Amino acid sequence: MLVDPGRAPLRAIPKRDPKDLMVAARWSWILAFDNISELSLDLSDTLCRLATGEGFVARRLFTDAEEEVAEYARPVVLTSVVDPMTQPDLIDRSLAVSLVRVPEDERKPEEEVWGEFTRLHSAILGGLLNLVAWGLASQETLSHLPRMADFTRFVYRALSPLNLHHKFLAAYERSREALEVTAVHENQAISTLVSLVQVRGSLEGFSQEILEALEEHVGYKGTKFRPKGWPSSPVAFGRLVQRFRSSLRALGIEVEVRHTKEGRRFLLYLKREEVVKSPGVIFEEELEGADLSKGG
């Protein structure tokens, strides 16, 4: 509503065809989807491409050999009462913000909320434009950049005059770590893998051997029972391990893949103990009383 007002600022996320996101990106600079319960693998991959930039190619209507090409890179806002982030590559592109529940005696009707928003609109927008100007003018460099390198560098530069740049990096890292831990624990096969590596210290073998070791570890071997989401084959399990490679590293488990004549051989081992802190509420104390118009 500040920088990209539209008729439907909040909408439901497309579920059937991820390409519908590209249509939404054509008409909005910021995509905001409300009350997300879960994200499919295809939708997670599409959101990843949309965050970093994606080319959309389709056959032009009423032609046989002509193409319609469009490229989009958009920020996406997801609201949810649960944590829908389960894929490590999407987690690397995300920043989680935990909102404090509003007590019933402090809730306000929409008329009052939007009236206050209208009153403060110009001041907030001016503050955001100052941040943008500082980010464009600054030449500060970072020695370490995460996957969203350009985003991180720009926000770091923009927040530098407020002395919030280092706090932003710390909050961003805490957010990623907390999301990665949540994703690991919500995937039963990967959480079991973490448990087994922590017990043994290391684990080595082909996908089938490690999958059998996991099933024996939790008592599935020799039975037909498999929980929902459990890898259906050694190939699926191998792909799952590689997809969660960065999340496992965040928990102190290194993953090495060796290509042999017999297939891919995995080596997982504990590198160091990792303590992950809760992300909490970001910037609540630091932003209180900050004057964006004066950089103080």
Image (cartoon, grey):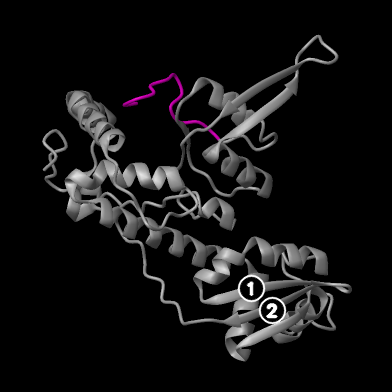
Q: Is 235 a magenta residue?
A: no
The numbered disc on residue 255 is 1
Looking at the rendering, the stretch of residues picked out in magenta corresponds to: 1-12
The residue positioned 49% from the left and 42% from the top of the image is 35
Classify residue 281 as left or right of residue 81. left
Residue at image point 45% right, 51% down: 81
On the image, the x and y values in percent for residue 257 come to: 71, 71
Could you say which quadrant of the image residue 249 lies in?
bottom right
- Location of the C terminus by quadrant is top left
- Tell me, yes or no, whether the highlighted magenta stretch contains residue 9: yes
* 87 relative to 201, above or below: above
Residue flagged by tag 2: what amino acid is it? Leu
Question: What residue does disc 2 label?
Answer: 267
For mark 1, does the 10 Å Cα neighbourhood hold few (<14), some (14 to 19), or many (20 or more) residues? Answer: many
Q: What element carries label 1?
A: strand
The amino acid type, in three-letter code, at marker 1 is: Val
Q: In which quarter of the image is the N terminus?
A: top left
Task: Give the image location of residue 286, x and y in percent.
Answer: 18, 53
C-alpha gap between disc 1 and disc 2? 6 Å
User: Residue at image x 45%, y 77%?
Assistant: 274
Image location of residue 20, percent across then percent down: 64, 29
Disc 1 + disc 2, Cβ < 8 Å: yes
Which residue corresponds to the image point at 61% horizontal and 82% vertical from the top-left? 269
Q: Where is residue 170 in the image (x, y as percent from the top left)?
A: 32, 60
- Could you say which quadrant of the image residue 48 lies in? top right
**Taking the image as drawn, is residue 83 in sight?**
yes
